[in-house]
Amino acid sequence: MSDNIFNPTHQETNTSNKIVAGLERISEAFKVLLWEKAKLLGLSPIQIQILIFINYHKIEFCNVSHLAKEFNVTKPTISDAVKVLVNKGFIKKVYSTSDSRSYAIQLSDSGKAIVTETENFAHPLKKQLNGIDNEDLESTFKTLSKLIYKLNQIGVLTVQRTCYACKFYQKNDNQHFCNLLEKELHNSEIRIDCGEFEQKV
């Protein structure tokens, strides 16, 4: 009998199966919350994700090629979303001085206003987490951050900016250390999306 993750009988005796099935349900909740917000504002989920992303990340990440990798979709999908957002006046293209075909994306003032309206879509998830014991939260985060790193290592997640893959990160005797910040890191201080991340060679 094969080890089928989504077979409830197999889940009874395999904790990893139960966790994967649980992550699938949480993924569904995330999609439902995002869709609800998208429909309310006449946008698509990917358009909302693009707006929120470019609001918080360096301009070198805010181009079609990187956004396609970031969200694991095709460049044409991102290009179509960008075209709609430009037409709605939520973003503007900033063309390269060295290549007139290359451009980065920035939010307009109305785009920033939309982000304020949309970025709370995941708050119902956070609200439920706020009611969980802090020790359990730290243990869950430790597992998730390792899982994200491992999925990136095998190519399932094409982009990640966690400490574990950063050139500034090192681990000595089970202690995390950031050479950029020049400080030891607790498990709760490991970052999922670090603004200073530089890929380890």
Image (tube, helix red, strand yellow):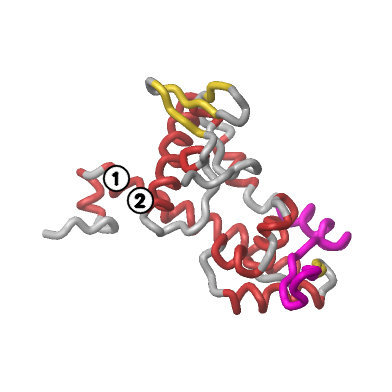
Give the class, few, some or many, for how many residues have Cα within 10 Å of label 2's Cα (few <14, many ≥20): some
* Residue 106 highlighted magenta (yes or no): yes
Using residue 149 as the reference point, say whether residue 160 is left or right of it: right
- Name the spot of residue 41 as percent of width and height, x first: 75, 67
Q: Is residue 173 above or below residue 200?
A: above
* Residue 41 highlighted magenta (yes or no): no
- Name the spot of residue 158 as percent of width and height, x first: 48, 59
- Name the spot of residue 123 as percent of width and height, x first: 65, 46
Using residue 131 as the reference point, say whether residue 21 is left or right of it: left
User: SS class of the residue under badge 2?
Assistant: helix
Q: Which residue is drawn at the image coordinates 66% and 53% (left, top)?
A: 121
Query: Residue farthest to the left?
Result: 1
For the residue pair 122 and 101, the one nearer the viewer reads as 101
Are the residues at dot 1 and dot 2 in contact (C-beta closer than 8 Å)?
Answer: yes
* Residue 20 image label: 2
Q: Is residue 171 above or below residue 194?
A: above
For the residue pair 13 and 84, the one nearer the viewer reads as 84
Q: Range of the magenta residues? A: 95-119
* Residue 16 image label: 1
Q: Which residue is drawn at the image coordinates 44% and 54% (left, top)?
A: 25
Q: In terms of image quadrants, where is residue 74?
A: bottom right
Looking at the rendered image, the quarter that the N terminus falls into is bottom left
* Residue 104 image label: none
User: SS class of the residue under badge 1?
Assistant: helix
Question: Cα distance, mark 1 to mark 2?
Answer: 6 Å
Residue type at the position of mark 1: Ser
Q: Which residue is drawn at the image coordinates 62% and 60% (left, top)?
A: 34
For the residue pair 157 and 1, the one nearer the viewer reads as 157
Q: Which residue is drawn at the image coordinates 49% and 28% (left, top)?
A: 187
Residue type at the position of mark 2: Val
